[in-house]
Amino acid sequence: MLNRLVHYAVFILLLMFSLFGRGQQQPAHSMGGMDSGKDQGMMRLMGEMHPKTFVQAIEHHASSGTSAEPNSTPVPMVMSMKGVWMLMFHANAFVLDTQQSSQRGGDKLFSTNWFMPMAERELGPGQLTVRGMFSLEPATVTSERYPLLFQQGETAYGIPIADGQHPHDFFMELAAIYDLHLGKDQLLSIYAAPIGDPAIGPTAYPHRASASENPVGTLGHHQQDSTHIANDVITIGYTKGIVRVEAGGFHGREPDEHRWNIDQGKIDSWATRLTVQPGQNWSGQVSYARIKSPEALFPDEDQARTTASVMYNRPVAHGNWANTLLWGRTRSLADDARENSYLLESTLRFRDRNYAWTRIENAGRTNELLLGEQPLPAEFHEEPLTHVQAYTAGYDREVSRWRGLSTALGAQVTAYGVGKPLQAVYGSDPAGVSVFVRLRPGS
């Protein structure tokens, strides 16, 4: 209870400062006709949109939680100035139809989506960022899931979700971040979020540039970044030059099937992350977390999660090339059972309006998947069973830019490699196809 009260006190204090604080305003100086505070703010905004240093990229806060992508990564969004506030809006939404083979495959028309409004201002000696993230998936993904062959790791009303991905919560993030410069290329950051993303893993899959055109989740989600919606998160980070170290606490239980509310819980888990940005186009991280009772079906099981990733982003003529190589491992502290997952993502934007991408995965699956969606038998013991491979390729083309809204039409195909213990249930070569419309703010 004390941890939660301290957490909310920090969040409310930062929010009150953002609403009522006046900050220290410096007199405007003339620069090419720009002599107003608003013009200076717009200049700072444009500087953050093209960060030259790791510290500048952090202060932009365009990724999920406090994670980082390469400095050169483009972020499509709309921006404006309102007094001393810099306002930004970032979003991604898909309306798609999925068809999958195999007796476990499913067909569905649904939407995956998220929306992120954000505001920044100078406050005292530092910068305050207030950010929210929301999703309408509780309404646009019915029956608590959308089809995703071989996915597991979530529950709904006491039953495991098999071959399906759960919708995101309506409240994905409510956070305040304060950044304080301690010297040249040194930054202290405090992140407080009743709902937020702890310092574990790379940027979560819905927000990675390398996954920007892929409308569905990853099979390795629960070994890599399933903590990206957690309760009662506090993270403190210190950056010097190209290196950042973070540590913090959060509530370990994953969100339940009630997707419109705000869950609560004491800070009972912790995470730490080391991030290195050796150049404009590179970012790497290693992270570790101890997670208290994350799964509702196994409340006495705590987990340790380790991830490591490398991202490479390269601007190209009339486009961009974004890549992620990621390993994640979840280990049960009850019996030392381990599940590993591996991912390679690559998205190429070319000739301005065209996108082509691939996602290649190798993810460990457990014997729970054999049972399907039914109550677990008494005395059931979950243990690693086999690995599954997923090979995805997709293409879309932007067909409209209207009033700052980018619309694209696309499709992707996924073929699976099935471990022998699962072939009797799934067959040896299941596949899936998705066609979609993608909408988001233009850059």
Image: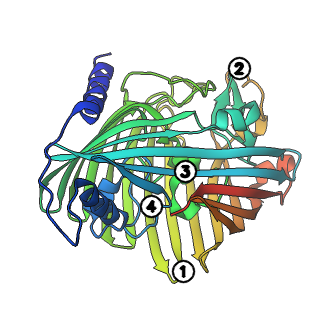
The residue lying at 46 percent from left, 44 percent from top is 117
Q: Earlier in the sequence, mark 2 or mark 3?
A: 3
Residue 8 appears at what percent x and percent y?
A: 32, 24
Residue tagged by mark 3? 91
The residue under label 1 is 318
- The secondary element bearing badge 4 is classed as strand
Distance between the Cα atoms at labels 2 and 4?
A: 38 Å
Discs 2, 3 touching: Cβ within 8 Å: no
Q: Which mark is residue 378?
A: 2
Q: Is residue 340 above or below residue 349?
A: above
Check disc 2 and report its element: helix, strand or loop: loop
> CA gap, disc 4 to disc 1?
27 Å
**If you read the primary sequence from the N terminus, does the residue marked by circle 3 or circle 4 appear first?**
3
Q: Nearer the viewer, residue 82 or 122?
A: 82
Image position, residue 172 (x, y; %): 51, 37
Residue 242: quadrant of the picture: bottom left
